[in-house]
Image (cartoon, rainbow, N blue to C red):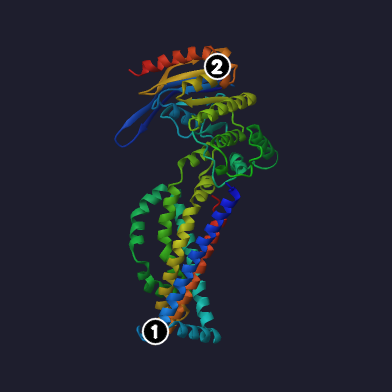
Amino acid sequence: MNIEQLHNQYKTSLKKENRLIRFYQILIFIVFFSSWELLSRKELIDPLIFSSPTKVWHLFIQKLGDGTLLSHSGVTLFETVLGFIIGTLLGTILASLLWWSPRLSKTLDPYLVILNAMPKVALGPIIIVAFGPGFPSIISMGAIISIIITTIVVYTAFREVDPNYLKVLQTFGATRTQAFREAILPASFPTIISTLKVNVGLSWVGVIVGEFLVSAKGLGYLIIYGFQVFNFTLVMLALMIIAVFATIMYQLVELLERKLIKD
Amino acid sequence: MSFLKIQDIHHTYFSNQTAATALADISLDIEKGEFVSFLGPSGCGKTTLLSIIAGLFPPTSGKILLENKPLKANSDLSIGYMLQQDYLFPWKTIEENILLGLKLIKKDEGLERIKTLKLLSDVGLGDTGKLYPRELSGGMRQRAALARTLAVDPKILLLDEPFSALDYQTKLKLEDLVFETLKSFGKTAVLVTHDIGEAIAMSDRIFLFSANPGSVHKTFKVPDELRELTPFHARNHPQYPMLFQTIWKELESLEY
């Protein structure tokens, strides 16, 4: 028996498996776009509604050239990132307050349930009238959609921290602030990161709906505008760009996860 | 005057339906440098008493004096507490873990830091400072927990069944280590256990608790011959099985 040889065999089989998976992933990509193109050209699907990859690509080049795409994407990205950060931060702060005062958390419990169940985008018109039809209201939409769910999830994580860690700190005479910083917060990092992942998706929803309503700038505006003038190539283009940006944000959160969580 | 004086402690746990008396009329004295054990069946209130001494919650009535001063919540870190499991923080390195107590009182720099790292090598973990708890075995982690407890230089150590989660061999080794470390620092210690052998091997005096309500049933003095030996050797001394039998019979008589 040759251990080294067996180990090499094992490594090759791993590599082969990975290569196979990567092959299928690329295959799906190619099949999806080429059949989309083909079906659209043969008019098996309505080219007016579903457009086609080449049309989207040509529009992309054109819009990139005249600079409009860059400015619209920039606006939306800025609003989404800010809405995402504000929503997560406020939600975590609110969760900390609830942990701090059990009485406050018991009092607010039914209100949190109601606020969580309510569709936040329905508040859109009120927010836009209150903050004006500009980026402050769109950012608020991006934030408000994730605050309550972040609060509930993070607060639950705070409460589920093993009480024995707190006991250790208590025997060292730690204050509640110290207990929060040394045990509660670091022990809850994995949960906070997973809410970040959920919030990436949520803040895109909030911002796009906000842009639908304000209808002045951004990728949400492009979608609504394309819909109104029946230019679905524009709608598809905006969707593609949103998909790319949302994926990049998600990857960044995963990068943060690897940095922050050591075990 | 004794070092730690426990006077007329009475404790009742309240819930909506019940008021369960866990401890009734507990009075006992512990001398400086002494190692005592609280032995008894589960539900006899021995851990409750330990928690009260640690200041985790106040008793319903009665008081506790350390060097003639009433013991409030553990504000001056005169009490060290070791739990059943190590509860090292998994996101901190071993070094950060054992410096935790000092960090909380902002003394984790300079001389105190060097002293604490020395403590780490005293418990045989000199080269593990940069590792994370998950990289250590159960016995090593419990040794690190001992170093963490000793780092703040407590006057008295409370051990809440710290060996119960370990395998037998590790447990015997760790008993010797804790015993020798505490003796060399001249620390007073209280051990809570349900293991008769462990109580005999480690302590100077044993308080046998009875349940419903928890109270001190009887006190045993461990003979000098056994006290001078390390726990491992005490277990092999001819006096050991005799005391074991006496306590065993007493425990049996508690279960009607």
Percent position of residue B46, x then y:
44, 26
Mark 2 element type = loop
Q: Chain of mark 2?
A: B
Q: Is residue A203 left or right of residue A10?
A: left
Within 10 Å of disc 2 (Cα), the crowding (few <14, some 14-19, many 20+) is: few
Percent position of residue A247, x then y:
49, 68
Q: Is residue B82 left or right of residue B128?
A: left
Which residue is most to the front?
Answer: A1
Residue under circle 1?
Answer: A40
Closer to the camera, B134 or A171?
B134
Q: Is residue B156 above or below residue B104?
A: above
Report whether residue B60 is seen.
yes
Q: Are marks 2 and 1 in contact (CB under 8 Å)?
A: no
Q: Is residue A242 left or right of residue B154?
A: left
Task: Please determine if labels 2 and 1 lie on a single subunit.
Answer: no
Report whether residue A221 is seen.
no
In percent of the image, x 48 and y 65: which residue is there?
A84
Mark 1 element type = helix
Closer to the camera, A241 or A123?
A241
Residue A63: mark in rendering: none
Three-letter amino acid code of the residue under disc 2:
Asn
In percent of the image, x 37 and y 32: which residue is there?
B13
